[in-house]
């Protein structure tokens, strides 16, 4: 049986000691930001269902936007859920509901891709309105 091209998941943003936005902004550089924050964590069973391999990235989309990030297996993540560190990458997928930012249980579609990881400078240019 062939794996589906994409699957729906719930995205939750989290704070992790090893993937800390403040630490990377304070002491890191653009490369360390991308290495430690442009990442999603997924249950190994979901990793297999998506036919992911180490050289593929994950494209995560919601109704408004999409991003491409690295993917890492994590047995502590429940099946059907993806987690990402709170960061400029995960913020691209947050939603506004009743004038509040939503960081948890965001319905997203995910698929394996060979597209490059979304670069920090590209997100900043987009935020600043520079295309």
Image: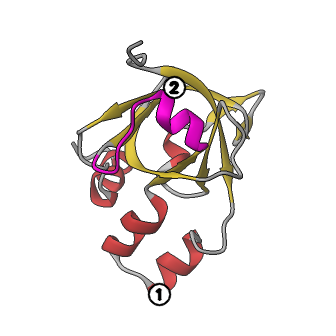
Q: Crowding at label 1, few (<14), some or many (≥20) Cα neighbours within 10 Å?
A: few
Q: Looking at the picture, how far across and down is residue 22, in whole percent?
A: 58, 75
Element at label 2 = loop
Q: What mark, if any, has residue 62 been given in the picture?
A: 2
Q: What residue sits right under mark 1 in the picture?
A: 27
Q: Which residues are magenta?
A: 43-55
Asked if residue 96 lies left or right of residue 73, the reply is right
Q: Looking at the picture, how far across and down is residue 101, in whole percent?
A: 70, 40
Residue shown at 42% from the left, 16% from the top: 4
Along the line of sight, the residue nearer the viewer: 68 or 4: 4
Along the line of sight, the residue nearer the viewer: 94 or 18: 18
Residue shown at 66% from the left, 74% from the top: 17
Element at label 1 = helix
Farthest residue toward the front?
A: 1
Would you say residue 119 sits in the magenta stretch? no
50 up-or-down from 100: above or below: above
Asked if residue 22 lies left or right of residue 111, the reply is right
96 up-or-down from 101: above or below: above
Would you say residue 54 sits in the magenta stretch? yes
Q: Crowding at label 2, few (<14), some or many (≥20) Cα neighbours within 10 Å?
A: some
């Amino acid at each position: 049986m062939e794996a589906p091209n994409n699957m729906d998941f719930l995205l939750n943003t989290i704070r992790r000691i090893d993937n800390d936005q403040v630490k990377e902004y304070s002491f890191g550089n653009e490369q360390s930001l991308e290495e430690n924050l442009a990442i999603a964590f997924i249950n190994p069973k979901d990793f297999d269902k998506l036919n992911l391999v180490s050289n593929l990235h994950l494209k995560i989309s919601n109704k408004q936007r999409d991003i491409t990030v690295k993917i890492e297996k994590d047995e502590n993540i429940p099946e059907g859920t993806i987690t990402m560190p709170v960061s400029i990458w995960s913020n691209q997928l947050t939603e506004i509901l009743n004038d509040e930012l939503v960081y948890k249980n965001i319905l997203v579609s995910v698929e394996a891709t060979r597209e490059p990881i979304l670069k920090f400078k590209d997100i900043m240019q987009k935020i600043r309105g520079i295309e």
